[in-house]
Every structure is written in C-alpha cells, then in structure tokens.
C-alpha cells in the first residue's frame, strides 16, 4: 500500500494522469472482437453490391473559430456612448475622495487626462445572463469608434451624428442623435468638469502584474444606468491612469455589467478610422428605418386590413420570441429594442388576435429574454435573469414567480403544464470552459425536481408533446427522461431543436457543416429509433448562417427554419421542396412559428412580425 | 499525415479502414468487450444511415465522435464500480503493478465520463489515438486553438478528479 500511496501522493499530479493514460493504452485490444464488429458493420450494406456514396471528396475544413453560435455577435449595445460617459464620469468622479493624499492622487489623474487626446481599450458588456460581448473602443478627440465582430459604430459627439457599418453586409447607416438619446460626451472632455462624489478606497491589488489602487463608487446614476449603479476602478499606482473599470447596474430588471480594460493611452490611430463618410465598397442601408409605416404610430400598432393581407401583423420593436396558441389564434411575443438602437427601454410582452390583427394586451416585462406557453392551462412563462414568472395567457398578468439558483436561459413547459424546463449557461472564455445544464421544476409546487449538469452551453429546450422527454440543444442535441434525468440519446447536432406535433420526429440543426457557410443543415430523426431519416439544407443566405428557430406546421407536413442571416426556409415534406420566404426579412430572423397548417409567423430584427402563407 | 478519403470510397472500405479504431476507442473507454461491441455497432449503424443521406466530410472525425459519445453515454449510465474483467496479461508482470495500473485505468474511465463531449473527444483523439492537433482540428472542424484549449481543460479536470479520488474528496 505504501507504493499505492506514493503514486497518489505524487508531487506531480500530471504524472498520475499520464500513468492512467498509459494504463489504458497499454491494455491489449481483442482483435477478434474488432473483426466481429467489422463483419456486422459491413452487413449493413449487404443489400448493395457496390455502394456508391454521395459525392464525398474530403476537403480540409477551414480553421475558423469553433462553431459556437454567435447569433448575437453583431451587437448588443445598450447605450454604448452613455457608457463612455460613464468612463468619463468615473475619471472625474472617481477620485472625489476625502483626504489630502487622495486629493493629490485625483489631481494627478486630472492632469494626466488633460494631455490625452486618444485612447484605445477593450470593452466587455453583459446584459442579464446573455453571453458577454467584447469590443474594441477607440477615442480620438471628440469621436468614438466601437468595433465588435462584424459591426462598427462611429460617434461624432460634436456634429451629433453616428455611423453604423455592417462589415458582413457591407452596408452603412448614418443617423442623427435623437432627443431621447442621452447626451453624448467625450470621456476625456468630461474630466474638465469636477464633480464630488464619495468614493470608497478598497486598498491595493495587483492586476496583470501591475500594482493598482482600487476605488468604488456606489448608488450611481451614470448615463444609461439607473441609481443602482456601482463602479469599481483600478488605477495604476505609478501612472495614476486607469487599468480597469467595472460598472454594474444591479437593478434586476436590467442587470448589466461593463468592464473596460487594456487601455492604451495616447494610442496612435489613423484619422480614417473616425470618418463618417461612406467607405468604399459599402452602400447605404435602406432597412435601417421601418419599411412600413403604421397609420397611427402612437396607437398600439394595430395593422390595417391591407397590412394583414400583405402579411404584416406588426412593425416597430423587435419581436425576439414568439409563441402561438393555434386553437385560440393568439400570438404572444417579447418586444425589445433592435441591436442598433441607442435607446434603452424595458422589454414588453404583447399578444395579438391573429384573425383581426388587434392587440389583446401589452405588459411591461423588464429584461424578459425567453417565453413558453401552455395553452391547455392558459399559462404563459417568462424568464428574466434568475426569475421564472408565470402569467395568465389571456391577460399577461403575473400569477406566480420564483427565483432560481442558476441564471435563466431558454425555457419550455410540458404538455400538461406540470413541468417546466429551463436551460442555463455559465459563460467561460471559450466553449471548452463554458458550462451549462437544465433545471426541471414542478410547476404546482414551484419546487426544483432535478438538475441535469454537464451539458455545456444550452441554447434551446423543448418537451416532447407525447412523452416525458426533454430535448436540449447547444453544443450537442441530447434527449433526457424528464422524470429521472437519464440521458436517452445524443445527436451530433447543435443550437436548436423542435419536436413535431405528433412527437414522432425531432428536427435539429446538424453539427455537420453544409459545405457553404451561408447554409445550415437540419436533420430529422425518428423518435422511435433515433435514426436520422432526413437531412435538409436551408436556402442560401447573404451571410453566414446561424439558425435561431425551428417550427413544424400543425399537421407536421412543413418545417420552417429562421436564420440570423435573414433567410426563412420552409420545407414541404409531401413534395420534398424547399422554399424561401416570399417577403424576406431585412434583418436577422429571431423566431418562426406556424399558426396553423400553412401560415407562418416570423419575428425579425427589422422590427417586423410577419404572417405568410406557405401553401402555393 | 492526414488521410484523404476520395470520391470512390465505399462502405466496405470505410469499415475496413475504421472498424479497429472505433472498437478500440469504445474499448478503452468502457473496458468491456461486450459493451464496446455494442457501441461500435451503434456507431457504424448511425454512420451508415448518415452516409446514405448526405456526404460525410471526415469519416475519422465522425466515427470517433460517435464512438466517444456513445461510449461516454454508456459509461455514465453505469453504476460507480466496474467489475474487473479478466484480461490476458503477461503472467510475468508483477501482480501489484497490474492492480495499480488497473485501478488507475478504471478511475480514468470514470473521470472521463465527467468531461464535456468535446473535451472527451479531443482527449481521446490525442492520448488514445495519438493524433496531432492539426489533424484533430480538421477532423472535428474546429480551430487548433480550440483543440489545445479543450485538451488543456480536459487534462486539468481529469487531474483534479483523479486527485480528489485519491484523497477521498468528491467533486
């Protein structure tokens, strides 16, 4: 046993792992068993003399970044420039400290700031429990430039204009500041005004190998942030310049976190980066403004009969999630600001009568991110942050609510309204460090029945309509027994999945690429055998495909897929054909739902809720 | 060298080329001939169905992934303690060394079941199948950086799990 202990207590734990690996890999392999496997596998094709596979030229895959769905990678700017003002506020407010030594430190900072005309830094923004979004920010005198993924925004604070560039679509949009937008200021210019604000010294820390003096200001009403804001600043002890700034809005209705770091003060940057002129190879984006004007924009957006016949149910804020009660013909949606908007408003829930187009009710919904319905029990579930809300589907009023341990993501209710499943994701620096799982709740008792851990990122959950099976889609597609939590099956899929209405099929986004980045694959599996019975391709889009939504028609004869690249593909299983939406969205498609056997509702980033017939 | 599979490859050739590898992956995860045969059969059945419905970009990547997922799923469903199957080992080996090696191997198998699917797949491709990062990146259609990250995280996690097992801590 001493020798056993010697191994376990080894000073180099990696050697234990390597020894374990060696133990496994030196075990002999039963080649007779391998031969049996080969014989049985060959017998699968025994009916064909010569099998001719579909064209299968092996092409090296691109070495692009791991295909984590970046559906939100274009944007989520909530009052970005207001945040820059927060930096300015920090730089002037932050050292309103008491004490002579602190005042001298403050004076040093102000002096430093006066000589700075440019700065580059990294900004990370996280709204509620969404995936953090990082961007590079550049400031040159009175102009700010933000770069994130495929989007660039340039704010001219002097001329009160801002330019938005979409690098993927090669479109540009130049807009004026509107009165509703908070005043935009240059953070460096803000330093010239001094504002006393008590700051708590948190002592010294070392970050990135540099010694820093840390201060915190609480109960802030910074631009874009309510009076519950909190700011923590790390100042370089030598240069007195900020090394890192963290701003938190702790209001649970719109919990937000900004982190600013990697500052390069007086960075050298070309003037062309800050120009508001239309760059070469770009064209102006006509979709930036609403395509269709509602007759009375101040009214709750009731479409005219002409609008309805043209397939328009609503135009305004972005319908990011939609659910349909096919029996009562009611559609419920979460409405939010589009990702280019510089306004921030609380999200809303709104329900329409699909026959008349009239709005039945509208309710404020804070930072609501996902919804699910159980028409049988007149139940609507909305999640935001760590709160599950149950509402009356007929009125939108809250009937019950409770907190969860994990931040909430996607949500689903089972067929009889007794169980609720929600996915959660704890974001790491990469897909490998990102964790996730599913919580299953008993609705009547509001008690947590079980947690299924270790699933990785979870984008979507759904209950089978006919069995106690829940599917999750994220880095894989997995089926679990909702009662025991036992894993039933895994598919090589990702991101999104949907059951057919009769529960016999499961559609999901395939992990296999389609050979064209602007196209996605959708696999259909038979639930009885888990065999893949069909593999479909979406219509080609104008940019990289990222499927956000799948929906079967009421008779399961059609399947629709909504894509962030703006395409909606509808497959007709009877004819085998695939069609695109006749009225393509001018922005990413967030959600698609069939309202009956042949009418498809879709909500897209251009702020339009469409109803389109899928029958020819 | 990364293998190139050409247009003319048929099912027989695919099975001949990959059957030992699929069985080996399953066997090294499960340490049970019976279970490994089941997993290998499920893997080829599913791969055959996929093969019928669309072209496969990388048979190596697909088969190893399927085999790893199926084997890990089966491993997770097992009870904690695996009965030690009598394998034919050299009669000349020291019995205690064999015992330690077997114990380590079993602990690694249990720990492997606690990794994410991608971490487990990358770990197996690196350490069990001795593939290089570039090869793995191509077969799994991810970046080499992702391969390195997944491997690093897998090793960290496994090291921690094996260490916790030895001190009696449960993670």
Image: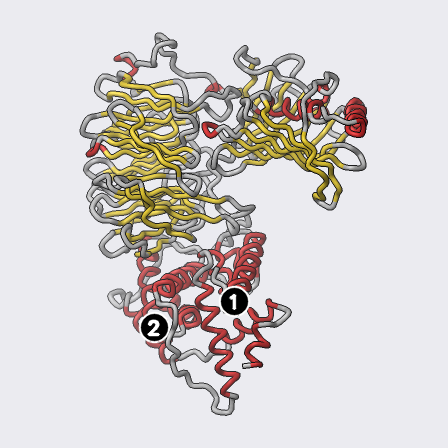
Residue at 56% x, 35% y: name it: A149
**Residue A170: horizontal and vertical position, in percent?**
54, 28
Q: Is residue A616 left or right of residue A342?
A: left
Whether residue A385 is visible to the viewer of this picture, yes or no, is: yes
Disc 2 chain ID? A
Q: Which mark is residue A44?
A: none
Tell me the distance, in whole angstroms, between the alpha carbons under discs 1 and 2: 32 Å
| In this view, A584 is above or below A11 | above
Q: Residue lying at the far top in this picture: please name it.
A: A296
Residue nearest the viewer, comparing B148 with A442 = A442
Q: Is residue B75 left or right of residue A169?
A: left
**Residue A162: horizontal and vertical position, in percent?**
59, 18
**Residue A97: horizontal and vertical position, in percent?**
72, 26
Residue marked by disc 2: A37
Residue nearest the viewer, comparing A398 with A415 = A398
* Disc number lying in front (1 or 2): 1
Whether residue A112 is visible to the viewer of this picture, yes or no, is: no
Quadrant in the rendering for residue B86: bottom left
Residue nearest the viewer, comparing A378 with A342 = A378
Residue marked by disc 1: B162
Residue at 22% x, 46% y: name it: A503
Q: Residue lying at the far front in this picture: please name it.
A: A99
Q: Is residue B138 left or right of residue A575?
A: right
Residue nearest the viewer, comparing A478 with B48 = A478
**Residue A102: horizontal and vertical position, in percent?**
77, 29
- Would you call the spot at circle 1 few (<14 residues within 10 Å), some (14-19), or many (20 or more)? many
Question: What secondary structure is marked by label 2?
Answer: helix
Question: What secondary structure is marked by label 1?
Answer: helix
Q: Quadrant of the N terminus of chain B?
A: bottom right
């Amino acid at each position: 046993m001493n020798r056993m202990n010697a191994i376990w207590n080894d000073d180099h734990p990696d050697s234990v792992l390597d020894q374990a690996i060696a133990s496994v890999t030196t075990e002999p392999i039963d080649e007779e068993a391998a031969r049996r496997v080969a014989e049985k596998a060959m017998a699968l094709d025994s009916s064909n003399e010569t099998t001719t596979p579909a064209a299968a030229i092996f092409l090296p895959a691109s070495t692009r970044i791991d295909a984590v769905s970046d559906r939100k990678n274009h944007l989520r700017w909530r009052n970005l420039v207001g945040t820059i003002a927060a930096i300015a506020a920090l730089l002037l407010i932050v050292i309103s400290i008491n004490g002579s030594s602190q005042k001298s430190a403050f004076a040093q900072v102000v002096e430093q700031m006066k000589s700075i005309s440019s700065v580059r830094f990294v900004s990370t923004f996280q709204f509620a429990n969404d995936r953090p979004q990082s961007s590079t920010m550049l400031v040159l005198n009175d102009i700010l430039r933000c770069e994130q993924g495929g989007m660039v925004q340039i704010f001219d604070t002097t001329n009160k204009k801002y330019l938005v560039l979409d690098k993927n679509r090669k479109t540009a949009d130049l807009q004026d500041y509107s009165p509703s937008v908070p005043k935009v200021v240059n953070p460096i210019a803000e330093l010239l005004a001094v504002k006393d604000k008590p700051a708590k010294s948190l002592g010294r820390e070392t970050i990135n190998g540099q010694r820093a003096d840390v201060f915190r200001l609480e109960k802030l009403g910074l631009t874009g942030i309510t009076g519950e804001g909190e700011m923590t600043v790390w100042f370089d002890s030598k240069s007195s310049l900020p090394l890192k700034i963290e701003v938190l809005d702790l209001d649970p209705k719109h919990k937000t976190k900004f982190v600013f770091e990697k500052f390069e003060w007086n960075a050298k940057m070309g003037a062309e980066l800050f120009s508001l002129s239309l760059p070469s190879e770009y064209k102006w984006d006509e979709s930036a403004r609403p395509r269709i004007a509602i007759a009375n924009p101040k009214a709750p957006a009731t479409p005219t009969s002409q609008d309805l016949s043209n397939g328009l149910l609503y135009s305004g804020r972005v319908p990011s999630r939609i659910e349909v009660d096919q029996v009562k013909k009611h559609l419920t949606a979460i409405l939010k600001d589009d990702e280019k908007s510089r306004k921030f408003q609380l999200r809303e829930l709104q329900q329409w009568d699909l026959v008349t187009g009239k709005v039945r009710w509208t309710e404020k919904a804070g930072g609501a991110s996902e919804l699910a319905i159980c028409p049988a029990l007149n139940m609507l579930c909305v999640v935001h942050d760590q709160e599950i809300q149950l509402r009356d589907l007929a009125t939108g009023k809250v009937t019950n609510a409770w907190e969860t341990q994990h931040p909430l993501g996607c949500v689903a209710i089972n067929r009889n309204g007794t169980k609720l499943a929600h996915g959660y994701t704890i974001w790491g620096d990469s897909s490998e460090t990102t964790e996730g799982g599913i919580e299953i709740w008993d609705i009547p008792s509001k008690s947590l029945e079980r947690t299924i851990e270790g699933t990785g990122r979870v984008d979507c959950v759904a209950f089978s309509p006919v069995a106690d099976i829940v599917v999750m889609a994220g880095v894989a597609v997995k089926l679990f027994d909702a009662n025991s939590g036992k894993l039933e099956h895994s598919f090589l899929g990702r991101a999104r999945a949907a059951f057919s209405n009769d529960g016999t099929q499961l559609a999901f986004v395939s992990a296999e690429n389609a050979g064209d980045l602007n196209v996605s694959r959708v696999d259909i599996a038979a639930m009885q055998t888990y065999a893949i019975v069909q593999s479909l391709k979406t219509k080609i889009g104008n940019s990289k495909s990222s499927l956000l939504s799948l929906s079967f028609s009421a008779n399961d004869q059609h399947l629709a897929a909504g894509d962030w690249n703006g395409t909606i593909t509808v497959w007709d299983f009877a004819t085998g054909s695939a069609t695109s939406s006749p009225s393509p969205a001018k922005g990413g498609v967030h959600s698609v739902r069939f309202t009956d056997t042949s009418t498809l509702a879709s909500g897209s980033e251009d702020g339009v809720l469409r109803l389109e017939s899928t029958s020819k | 060298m990364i293998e190139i599979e050409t247009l003319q490859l048929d099912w027989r050739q695919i099975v001949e080329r990959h059957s030992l590898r699929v069985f080996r992956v399953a066997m090294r995860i499960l340490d049970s001939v019976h279970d490994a045969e089941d997993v290998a059969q499920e893997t080829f059945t599913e791969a055959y169905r996929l093969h019928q419905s669309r072209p496969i970009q990388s048979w190596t990547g697909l088969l190893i992934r399927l085999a790893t997922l199926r084997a890990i799923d089966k491993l997770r469903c097992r009870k904690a303690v695996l009965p030690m199957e009598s394998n034919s080992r050299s009669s000349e080996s020291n019995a205690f060394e064999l015992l330690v090696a077997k114990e380590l191997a079993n602990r690694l198998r249990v720990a492997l079941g606690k990794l994410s699917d991608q971490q487990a797949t990358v770990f197996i491709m690196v350490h069990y199948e001795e593939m290089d990062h570039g090869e793995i990146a191509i077969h799994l259609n991810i970046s080499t950086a992702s391969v390195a990250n997944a491997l690093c995280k897998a090793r960290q996690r496994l090291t921690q799990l094996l260490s916790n097992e030895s001190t009696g801590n449960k993670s």
